[in-house]
Image (cartoon, rainbow, N blue to C red):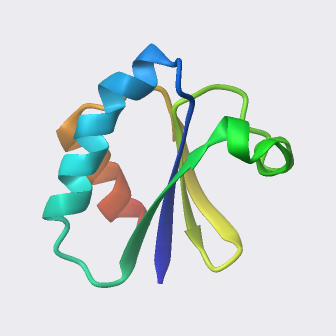
Amino acid sequence: MYKIVKYRGDNCNPCKVLAPIFEDFKKNNTRDDIEFHEVNIAEDEAGVEWLNIRSIPTIIIFRGDEELGRKSWVQMPNELKEWIYNVCK
């Protein structure tokens, strides 16, 4: 099982731009082996520090406890989809 986690902030404009792109991908995902999660960095400061998140939005793909990929900033819909499916092979 793959877990895709988007780290965001409430007052982050790039996070607001990425939000509908991420939601659309989540809604239209056809794979059963991918879970989507969203974390507000203000609510998980320890996790943000432990994962060394330095900019938001950041999307991290995990398989179990292993980090498989990470992207920061805004991604175009096709780029996001292609990246996620390439990492989640």
> Which residue is found at the position 44% from the left and 27% from the top?
15
Q: Where residue 42 sits: x, y (%)?
A: 70, 36
Residue 88 drawn above or below residue 40 = below
Compared with 37, 72 (above or below) is above
> What's the residue at 86%, 48% (across, down)?
46
Could you say where residue 88 lies in the image, as x and y percent from the top left? 40, 70
Q: Residue at x 31, y 23 (%)?
A: 17
Q: Is residue 26 left or right of residue 12?
A: left
| Quadrant in which the C terminus appears | bottom left
Please provide percent x and percent y for residue 18: 34, 31
The reply, left or right, for residue 23 in relation to residue 41 is left
Q: Count all numbered tags in the image, as a single digit.
A: 0
Q: Residue at x 20, y 66 (%)?
A: 29
State whether residue 78 is above or below residue 69: above
Image position of 15 (left or right of 64) = left
Give residue 85's position: percent from left, percent from top: 31, 63
Front-lying residue, 72 or 10:
10
Left or right of 6 in this view: 20:
left
- In which image quadrant can residue 28 be found? bottom left
Q: Is residue 16 above or below residue 3?
A: above
